[in-house]
Image: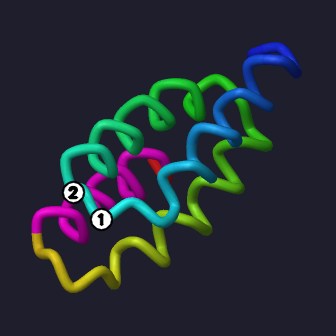
Amino acid sequence: MIDLCANKTAIKISKRVKNSKDWIVIIQTMNFLEKIAKEDEALRHWLLIKLDLISKDKRKTVSKKAEEIFQSLNQ
């Protein structure tokens, strides 16, 4: 399990990216958070909710990556 400081940092990062229009930033952030979420159950749960929302993005690259990470974290 990651420590509380790392968890808070991950959530801060994701909130900053929330309104990003840059698909590369969004995908890289999802990749980063996926790695951390594999070790932290609370972050994993939170991220799954966010990935579900992102999977409905109109940009196919973003929505497909969100779906892939969602499936990866549900295994």
Question: Is the Cβ of the residue at disc 2 closer than 8 Å to that at disc 1?
Answer: yes
Q: Position of residue 71 (x, y in %)?
A: 37, 57
Q: Position of residue 69 (x, y in %)?
A: 35, 50
Disc 1 residue type?
A: Lys
Mark 1 crowd level (few <14, some 14–19, many ≥20, 10 Å Cα): few
Q: What's the residue at 21%, 85% (across, down)?
A: 58
Q: Position of residue 48 (x, y in %)?
A: 57, 60
Question: Where is residue 43, by image quadrant?
Answer: top right
Disc number at residue 23? 2
Q: What's the residue at 11%, 64% (across, down)?
A: 61
Q: What's the residue at 56%, 30% (across, down)?
A: 38
Note whether residue 29 is visible: yes
Q: Where 7 falls versus 74 (above or below)?
A: above
- Give the SS element for disc 2: helix
Q: Which residues are magenta?
A: 61-73
Q: CA distance from mark 2 to mark 1?
A: 6 Å
Disc number at residue 21? 1
Disc number at residue 35? none
Q: What's the residue at 39%, 60% (across, down)?
A: 20
Query: Taking 37 as reference, is 71 left or right?
Result: left
